[in-house]
Image (cartoon, helix red, strand yellow):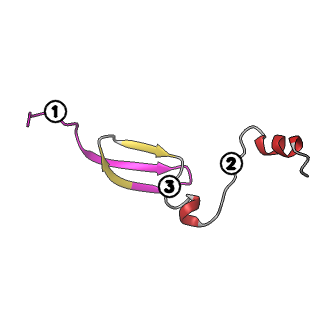
Amino acid sequence: MKPDIHPKYERTTVTCSCGAVYHIGSTKSELRIEVCGKCHPLYTGQQRIVDTGGRVERFKRRYGMK
């Protein structure tokens, strides 16, 4: 193998939008993520509906749902 071609592997801090902090190994020093194992619906069993721009309301108005 060629010497000095691999990136530096360091301890990384991963911060989720829910506030959870993880420490892993990676080539980056810090990562920010939106969903992790503590807040992902598959792991928590709770479903979140993310409504961006009123899509649900537009759908309900279009098809006459109240």
* Residue 62 pos. (x, y %): 87, 40
Is 55 displayed left or right of 9 in the figure? Answer: right
Amino acid at the residue labelled 2: Val
Give neighbour class at mark 2: few <14, some 14-19, many 20+ (Cα, 10 Å): few
- The Cα–Cα distance between marks 2 and 1, rounded to whole angstroms, is 42 Å
Indicate which disc, 2 or 1, sits on the residue closer to the N terminus. 1
Image: magenta residue range = 1-22
Indicate which disc, 3 or 1, sits on the residue closer to the N terminus. 1
- The Cα–Cα distance between marks 3 and 1, rounded to whole angstroms, is 31 Å
Cβ atoms under marks 2 and 1 closer than 8 Å: no
Amino acid at the residue labelled 1: Ile
Q: Nearer the viewer, residue 29 or 38?
A: 38
Magenta stretch: includes residue 6: yes
Q: Where does label 3 land, which residue? A: 36
Give neighbour class at mark 3: few <14, some 14-19, many 20+ (Cα, 10 Å): some
Q: Where does label 1 land, which residue? A: 5
Residue at 55%, 58% in the rendered image: 40
- The Cα–Cα distance between marks 2 and 3, rounded to whole angstroms, is 16 Å
Magenta stretch: includes residue 29: no
* Residue 22 pos. (x, y %): 41, 56
Q: Where does label 2 land, which residue? A: 50
* Residue 56 pos. (x, y %): 78, 45
Q: Quadrant of the N terminus?
A: top left
Q: Nearer the viewer, residue 18 or 55?
A: 55
The quadrant where residue 30 appears: top left
Looking at the rendered structure, the secondary structure element under dot 1 is loop
* Residue 38 pos. (x, y %): 52, 61
Indicate which disc, 2 or 3, sits on the residue closer to the N terminus. 3
